[in-house]
Image: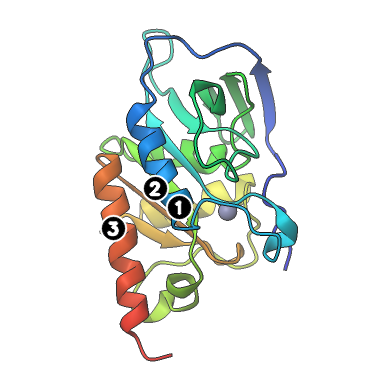
């Protein structure tokens, strides 16, 4: 199975400059650090050829960019702590055209297009977290989690469309899904970071209780 975490597949227009100083990264960084500590947004030389995995985002509308969101930077998941330079602000995107505009000292996560799908299709979503958690991924069916088509590769327009299909079909009342073609990949979204984090930990706990 091809993982290719960390390989940016969309067309990126990235301006390497600091994100605006009025953007507060305190909350998103606190949650990112917590998931890093749990090994869910991290790097492990024994997994996925040592690529960084997992990422986090928060809606961040700007006057000239109403759908803007803040997202952890590409190849940053191995960092236990980071400042604003570890984040990118995605200002504009076009999913069908596979294009994304961003500013930041670091380019946005390779999975930023997946986060864009969420903000475009769910007006109530203000945060999204993508983790790699083997247990709920392996037991997704038993947990009743919707699963993206395993033939669809991560970070592609096809994955974006697949997510959109599931999100708009009413199959995700809990706003959590498993990414079928992306080993251990789970993505969740919701009204704020704490509610997304609690949905992820609920599924992790439920998966642990299921018979192996
Ligand atoms: Zn991933």
Evaluate if marks 2 and 1 touch, with contact meaning CB atoms under 8 Å apart.
yes
Nearest to the observer: residue 93 or residue 143: 143
Residue 30 image offset from top left, x and y in percent: 36, 37
Residue 61 is tagged as: none
Instruction: Read off the residue under disc 1.
Output: 37
Q: Going by the image, does 71 lie left or right of 204?
A: right
Q: State the quadrant of the C terminus.
A: bottom left
Position of residue 11 measured from the top left corner of the image (x, y, whole percent): 70, 30
What separation in Å lies between label 2 and label 1 (alpha carbons)? 5 Å
Q: Report the side of 123 relative to 142 (left or right).
A: left
Q: Up-down: is 66 above or below 95?
A: above
Q: Residue at x 44, y 57 (%)?
A: 38
User: Tag 3 or tag 2, which sits nearer the N-term?
Assistant: 2
**Looking at the image, which residue is at 61% across and 11% down?**
17
- Whether the residue carrying mark 3 lies under 8 Å from ligand 1 is answered with no
Compare residues 71 and 165 and report the one nearer the observer.
71
Q: Which mark is residue 34?
A: 2
Q: Is residue 5 above or below residue 9?
A: below
At mark 2, the secondary structure is helix
Q: Is residue 53 left or right of residue 70?
A: right
For mark 3, what is the residue? Answer: 199
């Amino acid at each position: 199975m091809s993982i290719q975490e960390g390989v940016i597949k969309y067309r990126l227009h990235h301006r390497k400059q600091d994100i605006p100083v009025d953007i507060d990264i305190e909350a998103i960084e606190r949650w990112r650090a917590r998931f890093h500590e749990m090994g869910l947004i991290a790097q492990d030389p024994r997994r996925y050829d040592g690529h960084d995995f997992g990422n986090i985002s928060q809606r961040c509308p700007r006057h000239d960019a109403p759908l803007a969101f803040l997202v952890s930077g590409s190849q940053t998941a191995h960092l236990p702590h980071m400042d604003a330079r570890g984040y990118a602000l995605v200002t504009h995107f076009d999913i069908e055209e596979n294009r994304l505009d961003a500013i930041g000292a670091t380019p946005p996560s390779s999975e930023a297009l997946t986060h864009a799908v969420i903000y475009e299709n769910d007006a109530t979503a203000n945060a999204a977290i993508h983790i790699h958690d083997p247990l709920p991924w392996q037991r997704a069916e038993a947990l009743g989690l919707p699963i993206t088509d395993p033939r669809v590769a991560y970070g592609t327009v096809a994955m974006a469309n697949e997510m959109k299909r599931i999100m708009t079909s009413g199959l995700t009342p809990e706003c959590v899904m498993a990414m079928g073609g992306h080993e251990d990949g789970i993505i969740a979204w919701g009204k704020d970071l704490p509610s997304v984090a609690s949905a992820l930990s609920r599924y992790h706990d439920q998966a642990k209780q299921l018979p192996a």
